[in-house]
Image: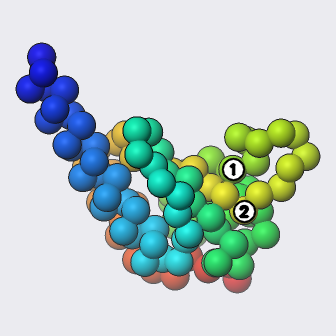
Amino acid sequence: MLLFAASTVLEHKQLRDKLETALRLSGFSLTSSEGTFSIFAGSRPLSFLSGEDCCRHLLAKHQILAVPGETFFRPGKSTSYVRFCFARSASLIDQAVSALSTSVEAA
């Protein structure tokens, strides 16, 4: 059981690192994601005024589904943060990394 847990932790760390690298190269600002299965990324450096605007753009232009940061704050609080989950298959993370290699900036 311990071996399974250790290999699962290592696998998710590798997925996180891969996605974090792609997000940084795309221009997102990142907060630490230690101990979670998600990455909280700031989209303001990419000229998005809200996390919701960024999520709509990512889905429409890059087929990446993310959750607006506004979901995690008090009602009415606007934020440019976006939440990406990396508890997915390696092939799905690879697809996201590939999609993020094209321009993500707001039009």
Q: Which residue is mark 2?
A: 80
Answer above or below: position of 67 versus 104.
above
**Image quadrant occupied by the N terminus:** top left
Task: Find residue 56 and report its horizontal and vertical position in percent.
Answer: 68, 60
* Helix, strand or loop under label 2: loop
Residue at figure coordinates x 30%, y 61% from the top left = 18
User: In the picture, residue 81 is in which quadrant?
Assistant: bottom right
Give the quarter of the figure containing the C terminus.
Answer: bottom right
Query: In the rendered structure, which disc, 1 or 2, sits on the residue that comes first in sequence?
Result: 1
Camera sees residue 51: yes
Q: Residue at x 46, y 68 (%)?
A: 23
Q: Which residue is mark 1?
A: 69
| Horizontal and vertical percent position of residue 65 | 54, 51
- Of 66 and 80, the residue lying toward us: 80
Q: Is residue 64 left or right of residue 18?
A: right
Residue 57 is left or right of residue 39, and the answer is right
Disc 1: CA contacts within 10 A as few (<14), some (14-19) or many (>=20): many
The residue type indicated by label 1 comes to: Gly
Q: Residue at x 21, y 43 (%)?
A: 11
Residue 85 visible: no
**Is 5 above or below relative to 23?**
above
Instruction: Say whether marks 1 and 2 touch (CB < 8 Å).
Output: yes
What is the basis of the colouring in this image? rainbow
Eyeballing the image, is 29 above or below 90?
below
Percent of width and height locating residue 79: 77, 58
Residue closest to the far left: 3
Crowding at dot 2, Cα within 10 Å, few <14 / some 14-19 / many 20+, comes out as many
Along the line of sight, which residue is nearer the eye, 95 or 25? 25
Q: Position of residue 19 (x, y in %)?
A: 37, 60
Disc 1 versus disc 2: distance between alpha carbons?
7 Å
Dot 1 falls on a residue whose secondary structure is helix
As drawn, the label of residue 32 is none
